[in-house]
Amino acid sequence: MVRPALAEYHAAARFIRAATHQRPTIGIITGSGLGALADRVAEPESIFTTDIPGWPVSTVEGHAGRLVFGRLGGTAALVMQGRIHFYEGYSMQALTMPIRVMQLLGIKTLVVTNAAGGLNPAFDVGDLMLIKDHINLPGLSGHNPLIGPNEPTLGPRFPNVAVAYTPALRALAHEVAGAQGLALREGIYVMVGGPSFETRAEVRFLRLIGADAVGMSTAAEVVVASHAGMQVLGLSLISNRLVPDSEALEATSHEEVLRAGQVAAPRLLTLVEGLFHRLGQAAPPAADSTD
Ligand code: HPA
């Protein structure tokens, strides 16, 4: 049976606290092709995740593993560059370890970003979508990251994740996007295991169950963040369109996903900086947490 690796989480948190004096309460995970966010951090202090004891190592192109502490939009932030995916062979527990470590580091608000395939026919490549809810397909089929003995100091046995994406943060995102003149879609994100892209029949299925965008990350992390009591904001960059009966479906590739990330990244970066600026005005003072 998989046990919650509490001692491992604490060891990683201790290592990070010893490596930097910065104590942000807001964190962000950058998705495929969106790692450039880390380059926008002012006064950065970087920690390579390969140096952190127990940290899962990202094996995917476009996912350099770094934690960058500094100021984003003027606000103290922790940027996690290089997330881990289920398809790399990690367990759900292992790939959500970074969220646990963030919890121990005192992160109270988590922004998750990803590149996603657009299922909603109204969506275009390059659109930004605020996640209002998710369908955790791996979770529903037995790969929930909370499976195993519960560690009560981290969260409850049966967490209610009905409202995992904090409404006040969604409202704030709309406000910031509006002020920037940026179009912001809103929709439901479905997580799949990957790494194969979807068949035509699967695209039809995902549309039928009400999803607007599909990707290979995020939902598992958000379940753990929600269990940890964090406030969560999710942003998807639509990197490709999934139209069941079009030839374009055959062209979906990781390169296409990364390319779209590069093209649309500046808009996402501007939005995120605006968000962090506003979050900083509302954030509680950063306190040094102990473990
Ligand atoms: N399917 C699954 N995951 C994705 C896609 C997709 O089309 N695009 C980006 N991530």
Image (cartoon, rainbow, N blue to C red):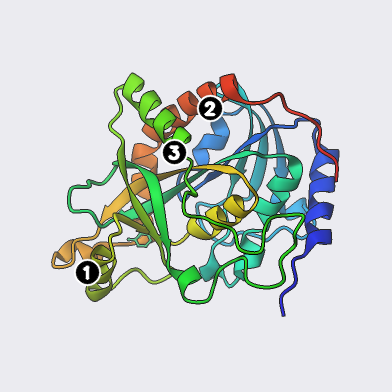
In the rendered view, tell whether residue 188 sits above or below residue 35: below
Q: Earlier in the sequence, mark 2 or mark 1?
A: 1
Q: Nearer the viewer, residue 84 or 189?
A: 189
Image location (x, y in percent) of residue 36: 50, 38
State whether label 3 is within 8 Å of ligand 1.
no
| Residue, disc 2 | 276
Q: Residues within 10 Å of mark 1 (few under 14, many from 20)?
A: some
Q: Secondary structure at mark 2?
A: helix
Disc 1 marks a residue whose amino acid type is: Arg
Q: Nearer the viewer, residue 165 or 220?
A: 165
Quarter of the render that holds ligand 1: bottom left
Q: Secondary structure at mark 3?
A: helix
- Say which residue appears at 61% left-offset and 23% top-offset: 75
The mark found on residue 204 in the picture is 1
Q: Residues within 10 Å of mark 3 (few under 14, many from 20)?
A: some
State whether label 1 is within 8 Å of ligand 1.
no
Disc 2 marks a residue whose amino acid type is: Phe
Q: Secondary structure at mark 1?
A: helix
Image location (x, y in percent) of residue 2: 71, 75
The alpha-carbon separation of the residues under discs 2 and 1 comes to 36 Å
- Say which residue appears at 55% left-offset and 68% top-offset: 144
Image location (x, y in percent) of residue 83: 57, 54
- Say which residue appears at 51% left-offset and 70% top-offset: 87
Q: Nearer the viewer, mark 3 or mark 2?
A: 3
CB contact under 8 Å: marks 3 and 2: no
- Say which residue appears at 78% left-offset and 29% top-offset: 287
